[in-house]
Image (tube, rainbow, N blue to C red):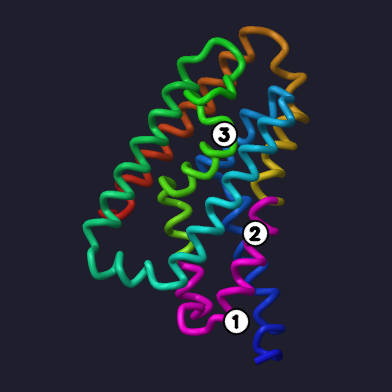
Amino acid sequence: MISQLATAILPMALFSLTTSISPGPVNFIALSLGTQKHKRQAFAFVSGATIGFTVLLALLGLGMEQLLTTYQPLLTVFNLLGSLFIAYLGYKIFTSRSPISTNQNNGGGFMHGFLLQWLNPKAWGSCLAGHAAFQTSNAPELLALFTLIYLIVCFVGVGSWAVAGTQISHLLSNQRTLCLFNRIMGGALILLALFLALQPYL
């Protein structure tokens, strides 16, 4: 078992990094928060998103996946609700003419990071794909290892987008560029929400 765990570390880490750092609604919001240099709020959001994803990953590995497979409409409902929520956040950012607020309405803070992962179809897809790839559902040791690796890598992956936001914040010093940035980020979230909503039917 020890050798099996050792050989699984690198593939799990690569899978976790690829899915955590690739563009998605959580990373786009982390980037937006980073541009404001509100380190405390950005850290809270990244922490919430990381823990929210890890809890989801663990619960799916412990058997919730079978429940959703049995009741397929539940997964469809989660996908639709999540896509609508992401589209709403995109709209709020798209129409903003000021720096993205870190208050409750625009997705900042620990709880919004946590809940956004539970409403994020990309997060559900990554969890289900990871469990299928590494066969963690019937191996508690593999599930524990996968969860631990994802906890670390997800924080680094999402956090890197917030750090990237701080690096480009100097480019958003005037109202015109700030509005353009908000529209690009908001539009990207809306398009992503549409793609995630339609993905099961494509």
The quadrant of the picture occupied by the N terminus is: bottom right
Quarter of the image for residue 12 reads bottom right
Counting the numbered discs, the total is 3
Q: What is the magenta range?
A: 129-155
Helix, strand or loop at label 3? It is helix
Question: How far apart are the alpha carbons under marks 3 and 2?
Answer: 19 Å
Earlier sequence position, callout 2 versus callout 1 = 1
Q: Residue at x 67, y 51 (%)?
A: 155
**Dot 1 amino acid type:** Glu
The residue tagged 3 is 29
Kindly state the secondary structure of the residue where label 2 is placed.
helix
Q: Which residue is mark 1?
A: 141
User: Of callouts 1 and 3, which one flags the residue occurring earlier in the amino acid sequence?
Assistant: 3
Q: Which label is found at residue 151?
A: 2
Q: Position of residue 18 (x, y in %)?
A: 61, 59
Say if mark 3 contacts mark 2, CB within 8 Å. Answer: no
| Label 2 Cα neighbours within 10 Å, binned few <14 / some 14-19 / many ≥20 | many
Residue 120 placement (x, y as % from top left): 44, 47
